[in-house]
Amino acid sequence: MKAVRFHGVGDLRVEEVPRPGQLASGQVRLAVRAAGICGSDLHNFRTGMWMSRLPVTPGHEFAAEVTEVGASVGHLAPGDLVVADSRATCGECPNCLAGRRNLCDRIGYVGEVCDGGFAEEVVLSAHEVIKVPAGVAPEIAALSEPLAVALRVVRRLDPKPGQPILIAGGGAIGGLAALLLSEFGFGPVSMAERNSARAALLARVANVEIVTLDQLSGYPLAIEATGSAAVLRTLIGDVAAGGRIVMVGIFDGEAVIPVNRLVEGEIELIGSAVFRDEQREAVDLLPRLALRLQALIGPAITLDAVPSAYGKLIAGDEAALKTIMRP
């Protein structure tokens, strides 16, 4: 079968590989129907930061059709559309036992510790997939993983009705957070996004007001979704005293920040890591959000086009919020 294989920093290839072998008990065979390219996929491509095995098939945001179930799998059947839970957790550490799987001491991710969805077929444990409601298209279902990350961000932000909110970065997570805030009636929401085409798209679909970095002062709530140290410093300097900043962007290395401003302004700086139970909630939201989500997806690409799509996304030239691969 055809698959995209990551061999090391800057080395992504489309190759013919053997199909996954016989199923073990508790596993399911999946025919991939749609897979999204995530910012962390691009980060891995540039840095190799989280990779624990090479070569590997990337892709953790995907929807697939069940084609075969192994022994002891009673809740799924061939023909079901499912999405992958991207997290590979140990289930044994204190965080896992306390229900904080996103903080697992040994957390890894599908597409990093095992082969992921940039392929025609993949095999996963049945407990790593979630069944999708009938009638949801695969490309919409593939958004459940980043939508869950965005839902976690909104939960960590904990906005109150009527509070102004600033989002720095209109990529997938920043844009989906804006969509959720709009859908839930929070805001007004402003967004700083340097890609003008994407900014216009989010203004239309997510009802955000587009602002520039020199218009950021005085917001009580902010989301940092760029992974830029300069942007984070700007947010800390300009957020209102007593304000809250939720960080979800992935940074390259360490960042120098004005820590005295955090102390003197009693500013909360909060991290948001993946999701806990939010993906199941996100799956349930898909029928309600389907039309707005569809507007954020660009034209589908093939497996062969994935490497070139990485380059375009890294350059920041893509207007759509999400690039979806259809095998």
Image (cartoon, rainbow, N blue to C red):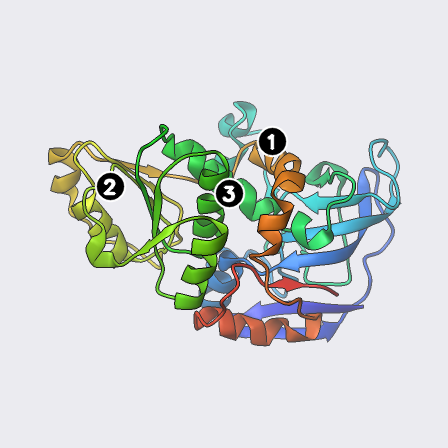
- From the viewer's side, name the closer residue of 286 and 54: 286
Can residue 109 be seen in the rendering of this structure? no
How many marks on residues? Answer: 3
- Where disc 3 sits, the SS reads helix
Task: Find the residue positioned furthest to the top.
Answer: 98
Task: Check disc 1 and report the residue beneath it.
Answer: 91
Task: Tell which tag, 3 or 2, sits nearer the viewer.
Answer: 2
Residue 160 left/right relative to 59: left
Residue 104 x/y as whole percent: 51, 36
Which three-letter amino acid code belongs to the residue tagged 3? Val
User: In what quadrant of the picture does the N terminus appear?
Assistant: bottom right
Residue 223 x/y as whole percent: 35, 44
Question: Within 10 Å of the Cα at label 3, are there few (<14), some (14-19), or many (20+) other Cα atoms?
Answer: many
- From the viewer's side, name the closer residue of 314 and 216: 216
Which three-letter amino acid code belongs to the residue tagged 2? Tyr
The residue depicted at 68 percent of the width and 55 percent of the height is 139
* Whether residue 98 is situated above or below residue 225 in the rendered picture: above
Task: Check disc 3 and report the residue beneath it.
Answer: 149
Asked if marks 1 and 2 touch (Cβ < 8 Å), the reply is: no
Query: Could you give the CA–CA distance between mark 1 and mark 3, rounded to whole angstroms?
Result: 20 Å
Task: Tell which tag, 1 or 3, sits nearer the viewer.
Answer: 3
Q: Quadrant of residue 82?
A: top right
Residue 92 x/y as whole percent: 58, 29
The residue depicted at 71 percent of the width and 51 percent of the height is 63
Mark identifier at residue 297: none
Task: Check disc 2 and report the residue beneath it.
Answer: 219
Residue 42 x/y as whole percent: 50, 64
Asked if marks 3 and 2 touch (Cβ < 8 Å), the reply is: no
Which is more N-terminal, label 2 or label 1? 1
Can residue 140 be seen in the rendering of this structure? yes
